[in-house]
């Protein structure tokens, strides 16, 4: 990994690292601002499916703009994919919880409100975070809450939920029940995670903890949260209602959306009652039920009932086994037919229109992925296929969707202005690369200049604002500095030092001044020069002036 990404982002220092990525503080040389750059680790960069999801979600996240969401400025790739984000001076909420929890109710409500406002904005844009945890919430020095890691959470959590227990260690304490079961998630999944954080802020502990990820997941699925008011009586019953509402196992019993949560928080602050039906218990799975026959068994007849239950269990087991055997035998051939999917060869789609590609894939027993990408091409006409996700003639399962990339035609890019501010050659090349031009297409011509510093741009072709192909020829005229000629040393004897400097500077001489006492020359008058007057010297050469300190000739 180079120290400067894509000729623009200079990595300054590591500010964070996780199992998936490393975060750097960096300087954006183009805009002159500090940014955060998150770079994927190598093991993720080799997973094409993961990288595709990462890019899609990162691009979606770049469209989100909200005061409580860390802004995404740019995405790119140099050796590995990276995301450029707003740099936040502050700490994670997790660090604050470790140092300050339990929080006063007002502080916990304020943090929860700001996170909820961020989620409401993201959910309205169709983006579910899926990895809400205090490590992904930053607190600025002025108390502003910033939610980060939008755009990668979905890609991470798709592997997290379907992987083994070891894959979800990082977020398992904040995982919603539906995520743990691999079911469809939604806005209420983010709200469940926020409920865990609210409980943690108010108590200084997690509602569900255990010796292993599996044990924690099982508590998320089956156990009610501990009583908030028993752990922190100052939190109050209405805030406890909100926590229990957010941590309901059944998604339909939680807040319908972040807007409802914001209304509930406002109600607590105003001293009003929070609407929450706790009849079924905080876990939403129903309260404890006591059966009458348990009392009878305790009073007598327990032995007979035990024998009867054993016989019933044996009979039921035998019946179930027989039924399963019949189902297996009867459905074996049908199951094989369902599981077996023949392989077909992917056709070559290059230079076809989207409609032609879809028809060709359909004839081969395949389909077009609805997520069509676009790119520029110097050889393929606009709206025709320039790439496909699976190479031609490769065998895939029948029915698979193939991603295609359509041409936008030849890329014509607006030429940046490189002559008004006379940037250095290196800076000019960086600007061209950022604009989309190929650095290899730049040619330079040396030209002397008395007004532009050496190695800086004097002129350019094409002109600023002109449209040019990405790999088109670009000529930059670069200053070689002044062109000096041989001259003679001016006679500046008896001149004041200021007058002498002015005369000598016109020839770009490098001047050194020495002083000595003199009874012949008045103070500040030039006594002698090296070289002497009328001696040959190259412009830009070194000249020594000897200036009188006085007292000068007697009056």
Image (cartoon, rainbow, N blue to C red):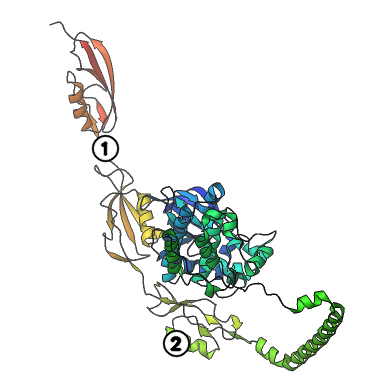
Q: SS class of the residue under badge 2?
A: helix
Residue 484 is marked as 1
In the rendered image, the vertical position of residue 2 relative to residue 351, given as above or below: above
Q: Nearer the viewer, residue 191 or 353?
A: 191
Give the number of the mark in front: 2 or 1: 2
How many angstroms separate mark 2 from mark 1 (CA)? 67 Å
Would residue 469 be found to the left or right of residue 509 on screen?
right
Q: Residue 258 location in percent, x, y?
A: 45, 67
| Residue denoted by label 2 | 356
Residue 496 lies in quadrant: top left
Q: Residue 449 location in percent, x, y?
A: 26, 44
Would residue 270 be found to the left or right of residue 79 on screen?
left
In this figure, what is the number of numbered marks? 2
Q: Residue at x 46, y 70 (%)?
A: 257
Q: Residue at x 84, y 77 (%)?
A: 300
Image quadrant where one finds the C terminus: top left
Of mark 2 and mark 1, the one earlier in the sequence is 2
Would residue 380 be found to the left or right of residue 216 on screen?
left
Q: Residue at x 37, y 75 (%)?
A: 409
Q: Residue 282 location in percent, x, y?
A: 58, 68
Report whether residue 40 is seen: no
């Amino acid at each position: 990994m180079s120290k400067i990404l894509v000729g623009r982002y200079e990595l300054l220092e590591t500010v964070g690292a996780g199992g998936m990525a490393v975060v750097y503080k960096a300087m954006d040389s183009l805009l002159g601002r500090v940014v955060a750059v998150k770079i994927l680790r190598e093991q993720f960069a080799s997973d094409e499916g993961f990288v595709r999801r990462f890019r899609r979600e990162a691009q979606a996240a770049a469209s989100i703009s909200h005061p409580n969401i860390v802004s995404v400025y740019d995405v790119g790739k140099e050796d590995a994919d990276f995301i450029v984000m707003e740099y936040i001076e502050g700490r994670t909420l997790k660090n604050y919880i470790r140092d300050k929890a339990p929080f006063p109710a007002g502080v916990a409500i304020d943090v929860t409100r700001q996170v909820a406002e961020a989620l409401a904005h993201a959910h309205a844009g169709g983006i579910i975070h899926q990895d809400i945890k205090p490590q992904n919430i930053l607190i600025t020095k002025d108390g502003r809450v910033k939610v980060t890691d939008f755009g990668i959470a979905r890609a991470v959590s798709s592997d997290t939920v379907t992987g083994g227990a070891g894959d979800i260690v990082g977020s398992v304490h904040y995982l919603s029940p539906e995520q743990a079961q691999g079911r469809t998630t939604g806005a209420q999944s983010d709200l469940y995670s926020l409920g865990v954080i609210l409980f943690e802020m108010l108590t200084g502990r997690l509602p569900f903890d255990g010796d292993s990820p599996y044990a924690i997941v099982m508590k998320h699925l089956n156990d009610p949260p501990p009583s908030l008011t028993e752990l922190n009586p100052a939190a109050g019953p209405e805030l406890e209602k909100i926590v229990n509402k957010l941590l309901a196992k059944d998604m339909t019993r939680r807040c319908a959306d972040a807007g409802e949560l914001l209304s509930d928080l406002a109600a607590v602050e105003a001293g009003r009652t929070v609407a929450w039906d706790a009849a079924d218990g905080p876990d939403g799975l129903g309260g404890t039920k006591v059966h009458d026959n348990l009392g009878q068994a305790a009073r007598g007849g327990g032995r007979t009932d035990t024998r009867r239950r054993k016989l019933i269990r044996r009979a039921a087991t035998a019946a179930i086994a027989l039924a399963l055997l019949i189902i297996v035998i009867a459905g074996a051939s049908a199951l094989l037919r369902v599981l077996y999917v023949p392989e077909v060869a992917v056709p070559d789609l290059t230079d076809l229109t989207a409609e032609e590609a879809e028809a060709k894939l359909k004839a081969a027993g395949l389909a077009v992925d609805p997520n069509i990408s676009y790119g520029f091409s110097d050889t393929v006409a606009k709206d025709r296929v320039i790439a496909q996700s699976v190479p031609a003639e490769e065998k895939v399962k029948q029915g698979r969707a193939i991603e295609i990339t359509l041409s936008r035609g030849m890329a014509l890019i607006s030429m940046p202005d490189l002559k008004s501010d006379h940037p250095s050659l290196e800076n000019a090349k960086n600007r061209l690369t950022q604009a989309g031009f190929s650095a290899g297409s730049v040619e330079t011509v040396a030209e002397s200049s008395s007004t532009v510093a050496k190695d800086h741009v004097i002129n350019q072709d094409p002109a600023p604002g002109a449209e040019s192909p990405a790999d088109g020829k670009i000529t930059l005229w670069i200053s070689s500095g002044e062109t000096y000629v041989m001259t003679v040393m001016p006679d500046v004897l008896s001149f004041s030092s200021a007058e002498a400097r002015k005369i000598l500077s016109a020839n770009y001489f490098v001047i050194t001044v020495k002083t000595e006492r003199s009874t012949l020359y008045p103070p500040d008058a030039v006594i002698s020069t090296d070289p002497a007057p009328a001696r040959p010297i190259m412009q830009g050469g070194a000249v020594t002036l000897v200036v009188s300190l006085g007292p000068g000739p007697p009056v």
